[in-house]
Structures are given as structure tokens and as C-alpha cells.
Image (cartoon, helix red, strand yellow):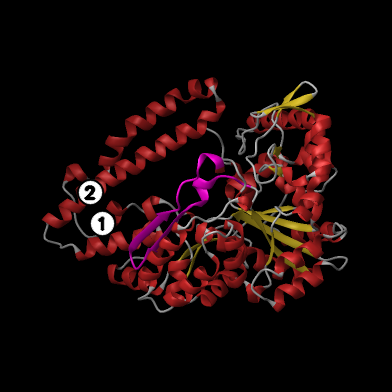
Amino acid sequence: MASDFFAQFIAGEADATTLLPARPLEPAAWDEAASRAGRKRLVQGVVEELQRQAASLPASPVRQAALTALGRPGTTCVVAGQQVGVFLGPLYTVHKAATAVARARWLGERTGRACIPIFWLQTEDHDWAEVARFDGCVRGRWLSGRLAPESAAEARVSLAHRRLPPDVEVHLGSLSRALAPLPHGAEVTALLGRHYVAGRSPGAAFAGVLAELFADEGLVLLDPRTPAMAARAAPLVQFALEENDAISTLLEERGAALARFGFQEQVHTRPDASLAFFHPAGAGGPRFRPDRDGDGFRTPLGRVTLAELRARLADDPLSFSTSALLRPLVQDSLLPTAATLGGPAECTYFAQLPPVYARAGLELPMIAPRARFRVVDPWTASALDRLGLLPEDTDQPVHALAARLHAWPAWMGASLRERLLGPLERQLEAVRPEVLALDPALARAVAKTRAHVARGVDRFIGRLQRAALVSSGLGTDALEALAQVTAALQPAGRPQERVHGFWAIAAEVGPRALVSSLVSAAASLSPELRTVRP
């Protein structure tokens, strides 16, 4: 089984730090990162473009002051980013922004050098299915929705060039009704309604809400999908095209190095595929990753030569966009980045990039984990108190929590899960070497299969034990309360921050209280999951 790169990276173990030599839990390493970033010169025109973008956002004197400071020599920044999900997507979007604010403040105070929090809007992405869903939990009741699916003509079109469909306002109406009884429900609904309007781009709506939430913190938002930003990213896009063969070799060698240490590539790479995407039909058309083919590249819409791509890039930089492995290089070519923040997967894919940074003549910034939170609103806290549970107890399956309330028949005890799930897990592990020999990328499929079956077994056992509790005469109130707190804090067995949006919690405590509590809690460098009670 592959080793966990992120866990070893955070622990500072030699295998991981050989591949990614950052020390994100050591304050002195941040000092060094700030010193390196402070020597960089900001690319001309970037601040002016950020000020132009900020002019379309809700007003914030603090943000304007941050932009002014960004233009001064020696200023650095801490950067986080995320896809522009509907209604801000999962809670970790807000956690990332709060971490950027907290770490920028901390680093600025520590070094005496101005440090600006920046949020990179990933509007170049085209995965509509991933961003169009929203989930939340309103006083124990799970709410979810999905915007209308994309048409064939919209497939592979960057989110910057998409428009919110009419049903976004229908979903907003449903949220409004659900949030209405909550203390700040009307405030949160109004916030979302000011920005999530049919016909507006998902990026503009996302940016508007995030800018309002963090107006007092001076969070700067950067949309790369504009003519000015694309023109300034063009040198790195050209690098990706012209150095395609060398980059492919570096990534292949890096993948082999990761494997020698027992790690897997986080971002699967193909030997001939470019790190840049090409939009043959123009900026608003579908994007494809060109595959190297002799002196040119193949795309689904035909073959193009390198000379043709160079000419197109010079004439229309928005006809190109970045992949997950190219975006950080563009970011760090434009900005004086002291640190880039991410979750475990994002930090892990940086282990693939040091040779590519070196080839591009760029310095790798500090790579650091964002803060991780379990946010407990007052209603959920009250339900936990009635059950005699702590928030962290919900990390256990519902049936394990229910076991505290009732003694199960012997056949329904702790061994039932092992008897049902154990044989499958052992067989999956037995065939894993043969599966990976066929295709290393299938490792994720094996892991997903195991997780999917485990969730199904846990749901089955939970239903059995629920039936046993009801038949015991214990009543359904405790069972309902258990279901409610787990839906709020560990929905479907997944971390709260990866599923639920910010809006239900903000409607309980107020947007300002939520943001302030998260920024305060994010000051620690530790990536350990922390409980926050706004």
C-alpha cells in the first residue's frame, strides 16, 4: 500500500522532505520564505489589474489598502485558491480564505514585512459537475441541490465563460425558506441573492460573496481568466509548450522517484500531454490538453504546430489556460508568494513540481496546509449536550454512537462489521499488486471501492441497530438526535468541511461571527482538525 505523503511531509520525515523541502510547522522556515519572496519584483501591471477587478466587488477600504501595499517593494503574499462552486461550495473554501488571512497577518507581524492574503479564483477549470452541487445542514436536516447539467455545447468550457442557469434562483428560494427561521437567515439569503443571479458567471458570483464575507480582513481576490492576467501568464504558457518534452521527462522521473519512496503521484501525468490547455475555438470555447506529436500537437479538433500555437498565444492569450500543475508556476511568476496553502491533496501534488520550478527558473514558495475545522453551531451544540456527546465523538459511525445508548444482541456487536467487510478488504488487498501492474492509476479505484463498500456496510449496520433501538422501547428521539448531529458534523461519514456549505452555520451565528472565529482559530500552523464554536 502506498505511503501517505502528506502525513510524512507534516511530520518532517526524511523521505517526504527529500522531495518537498519545506518545513511548514517551523516559524523560522516561514521567515526564510518571506525573505525570499520579499526580494521578488511584482510583474508590472498585476496590481493595476487586481485593482480593476476589485472595483467590481463590494467595497472594502481594507482590501484597497492591501492592494496599495502589494505594489510596494518588499511586500509578500500568502495565497489560497479554490474552484468557484455554487454558494461558495464546501466549507473548506471559507477555511482556506480564513487561513490565508490569519497566516498573512501572523507573517507580517513576525517579519515586519507587509504580507497580503490572496485568494486565487480557479475560473479556468471546466468541471461543471463538481462545482454545481451544494449541500448544507439546517438544524439537523440535510439540504442539497444541483444546478442544471451542462449542455453539449458547454462541455469543457472554462467556468469564467459559463453563466448561472435560471434554476439558481429557484434553489436560492429553497434556501431562503429553509434558513428563514434561523437568527441570521435573512442576512445570509440576502448576501447570496446579491450575487447568485441567473445569467451571471459562477466566478463573479463566488467572488462577490467571498469579498463581502472577508471585506474587513482585506482578502484580495484574483481572477486569472481576464485578458490582462492571461497576457501576463503567457510566458509560462509558452514555457509549457516549448519545453513540453523536457517537462514530461522531469515529471516522469519525479513519478519514479515518488514510487521509490513508496508514494503515488497526486496528479496523474501523461508523457506527451502539455501542462497548458488550448481553446481552439477561442476563449469561450472548449479547452483541450494538447498531446505532443512530432513538431506539433494533437487536439480533438485537429493538429497544430508549435509555431501556430506560439502565434495564437501572442495574438490571443485567453485561448490558453492552465492545468493543476501549471497554475502554481503562473501564480509564483506573477506574485511575491511567501506561502501557498492547500489541503492534503494540494500539498501532495507540489511534491511533483520542484524540478519543473527549477526548469522555469522559479523559486518554490513555502507549501503549507490550510487549517482544518469542525464548526459547531449553537443548535448542534445543544443537541450534543442532550446526548452527552462531544463533537469529536461524531467521527465514529452512527451505530457506534448508538451503542452507548443500548446493548446490542451478540450477533450485532462490534464483530459484525469485520465479518461483513473483512473478506472483501482482504481480497482487494490481495489483488492490488496485479491491478496496479495493469494500470497504476487504478489505485484510486481500489481505494474508492473499499470506501464505497465500507459506507454501505456502515449504513446497513446502522439500520439494523436503529431497528434494535426502536424495538427496545428506547424511543426515536435519541436516534433522531444522533442522526441530526452526525448529519451536521460528519455527513455520510465524511468531514463536515468537505460537504456542507457555510450558509447554514452563518445563518445560525451570523456571517461576521463565523468569519472572525475561523480567522482567529486559523492562526496556528498545525493542520490538526480543530473544533470551532462561533
> Is disc 1 placed on a helix, strand or loop?
helix
What segment is highlighted magenta in the picture?
Answer: 125-153
Q: Residue at x 32, y 41 (%)?
A: 456
Q: Can see residue 358?
A: no
> Is disc 2 placed on a helix, strand or loop?
helix
The image quarter in which residue 524 lies: bottom right
Amino acid of disc 2: Arg
Q: Position of residue 143 (x, y in %)?
A: 37, 60
Q: Residue at x 78, y 41 (%)?
A: 237
Please tell me the numbered disc located at residue 333.
none
Q: Position of residue 436 (x, y in %)?
A: 53, 24
The image quarter in which residue 366 lies: bottom right
- Residue 149: within the magenta? yes
Q: Can see residue 61?
A: yes
Q: Residue at x 84, y 60 (%)?
A: 45
Q: Position of residue 122 (x, y in %)?
A: 64, 52
Q: Which residue is mark 1?
A: 402
Q: Nearest to the eye among marks 1 and 2: give it.
A: 2
Q: Of label 1 and label 2, which has the lower sequence position? A: 1
Real-space Cα distance between discs 1 and 2? 11 Å
Q: Is residue 23 left or right of residue 362?
A: left
- Which of 521/441 is in front? 441
Q: Residue at x 35, y 30 (%)?
A: 424
- Which of 203/419 is in front? 203
Q: Is residue 318 above or below residue 373?
A: above
Q: Residues within 10 Å of mark 1 (few under 14, many from 20)?
A: many
Q: Are marks 1 and 2 in contact (CB under 8 Å)?
A: no
- Which of 293/500 is in front? 293
Q: Which residue is mark 2?
A: 463
